[in-house]
Image (cartoon, grey):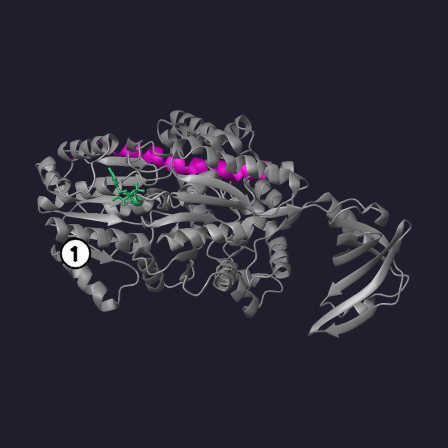
Amino acid sequence: MLLSDDIKSLKGIADKTAESFYSAGLFNLNDLLHYFPRNYESLKEISPIAAIAGDGYVTLKGKVSSAVSSVYRNGKNMTQFSFSDQSGTARVSVFNMPWLKKSLFAGRELIMRVYAKRKGMQVYLSQPKFYTEDEYKEALMHLKAVYPLTKKLNDAPLRKAIEQALVLADDIKEYLPDYILKDRKLISIPEAIRRMHKPADMDEVYEARRRLAFDEFFLFLVKMELLKEGEEKEKSSYIATDPEASFEKLKAHLPFKLTAAQQRAIEDVFADMKSGYCMNRLLQGDVGSGKTIVAFAAALAVCEDGRQAAVMAPTEVLAKQHYDDAVRMSREYGLCFKPVLLSGSLKAKEKREAKEGIAEGRYNLIIGTHALIQDDVIAKDLALMITDEQHRFGVRQRMSLAAKGKAPHVLVMSATPIPRTLGLILYGDLDVSVINELPAERLPIKNAVMSEDEHTKIYQFIYKRISEGRQAYIICPMVDEGGLEDVTNVTQYSERLRQIFPPSVRIEMLHGKMKSAEKNDIMERFSKGECDILISTTVVEVGVNVPNASVMVVENAERFGLSQLHQLRGRVGRGGYQSYCIFVAGKEDEKLGKRTKERLNVLKETNDGFKIAEEDLKQRGPGDFFGLRQSGLPYFKIADIYTDAELLKETKQTVEEVLRNDPGRTIPALMAAIRERESLSYIDFHGICL
Ligand code: ADP
Ligand code: MG
């Protein structure tokens, strides 16, 4: 067997099962090895029935102590029996396992992991999983991996397949020299893979994960270093003639005065574009700080000089918004923009027309999503490339669009306030401008952390704001971003809300599985004020600008990282209205609950994104990588720049050390190994092309 073998080469996987694996992105055995659990369960030691106090999973050993009944009710089968150990008796109810009746009988000994509920003197058991004595002993030694599943991909076949594939773990080559492994206390890759799937305890998981996270950081940083080495300051083909003068034409019409920070950022950008060398600048500014105008100022200078500029946005919604802005500005302010929107939802004919226009130079402002970077889009004279919300893009995409011009200037904008120390490592190849103030007249957002049983209050509050003419977002509990369950959640939530609110309240929903035309349509209606409440998954997270929306409700806020919550909050407070953000903490066990409150309180206390990022960094510890949505940086699948901040710093040192000890750059061997792993879809680095 080879890592690259199709999963069909495994025992028990025929065409139909294979389809279910393919649908989850699992094609070969290597994919399987890298399909990591989302959490782990431990089988507890056997406890007596009498000791069951509250609700939860327990492991019991005893005997079936009654006849076993099996009945059908409402189309469901229910098997019931009594179960006793020396300390007491409990009632077991099992759904939809009719075959149990055949194998169970009074007196049969059982070991089972089961969900227990105590009501007064009675104990009720459900969802049993049965173990033989041997299986139980074996299970005690390992944690049980809990894999992310989909509607099609089921647990049992996945487990069997991974179990079989694990023998191939040793085929994955080590690329790090021994001294690094020793120095940095890293376990080998095969060991890491095995432990991710079958750890003895959580410490093993942490070690395994640490190794895999290290790999991600290492490869990313090596590539970045090599890229920097190869790249002297590049001469630019475009030198701006008088960007200040062209900007005056825009500035004169703006309904607001630029903040000092915006002014500084624009000066930085203009200086770069006049320098004769390629701009490589990151514009960092909190949500709502007004980065867009900086982008348009830069684009205008380029267009005035008769060249082309491109703006790349991470979502269709956002691209459309920039496009509409550009169209409006050119019309109202008499600017020279000839904008074109290039997005995935264009019809073939429209797309052809757009591409031709771009190639011939009929359009000078190209706005779009990643469709922009498809190989066959060739700009006539691209002099500037702007990427909005850069953290959604890999550097590779940045580079490949940049390659479309003769060394264009590159401006990347990000609202992800990354703590400075980490930013220096991750964005080491960029100059940085920071917009560190919000427009003065902006009213600070008012925040509240509320619990699930306060929903009536929340809905009344929303209703009041809607009656005043405002609009509201509700971010729905998400299961797996873009997954089917999210769709169900959003749909059910919308239905519930439609019953609660009077019919005059217009409710729409938005989720990642919708076609982009549909998404655009809904977003457009929301921004025109034709919809009052928008229920959505996190697809609205990035950059959407509807100044009339003044309420943001985030359900199950505990599932998000602080920085991400801050991003979501940034959808409101963008106009002159007092805005509100309500974080709803879902029900959890008590220990977690207190920490959640503490975490969410940080958001209540400050609206400053950089402070929140620092706090995020402080609060996260090992173990936080399960269940919590991470920073939204796409470079890393396993690593998280917050949770693994220390590791990131260590890795940075290691990379420097490795490269220093290798002046002749024998690292190509290493890079070859890296490429091999990548081609085996090891980890999707979204990295830099070499
Ligand atoms: P972001 O930095 O999140 O991309 P935007 O550029 O979308 O922010 O700006 C948010 C809103 O603030 C927009 O409606 C924009 O017109 C407005 N805006 C930008 N700069 C200023 C300013 N200096 N004063 C007042 N409003 C501003
Ligand atoms: Mg923006």
Foreground residue, 269 or 659?
269
- Image height check: is 30 above or below 241? below
Q: Quadrant of the N terminus?
A: bottom right
Horizontally, is 462 left or right of 242 in the view?
A: right
Tell me how many marks there are: 1
Q: Position of residue 144 (x, y in %)?
A: 67, 48
Residue 202 % position (x, y):
64, 39
* Image coords of residue 47 (percent x, y): 82, 46
The residue at 18%/31% (across/down) is 267
x and y, in percent, of residue 44 in the image: 75, 45
Q: Quadrant of the C terminus?
A: top left
Query: Where ligand 2 lies, by image quadrant?
Result: top left
**Front residue (pair 259, 297):** 259
Residue 111 painted magenta: no
Residue placed most toward the observer, 659 or 281: 281
Q: Nearer the viewer, residue 550 or 50?
A: 550
> What is the magenta range?
207-235
Q: Is residue 515 above or below residue 41?
A: below
Q: Is residue 220 one of those drawn in magenta? A: yes
Q: Which residue is mark 1?
A: 358
**Local crowd at mark 1 within 10 Å, few (<14), some, or many (≥20)?**
many
**Secondary structure category for the residue under label 1:** helix
Q: What amino acid is found at the position of numbered circle 1 in the picture?
A: Ile
- Image quarter of residue 592: top right
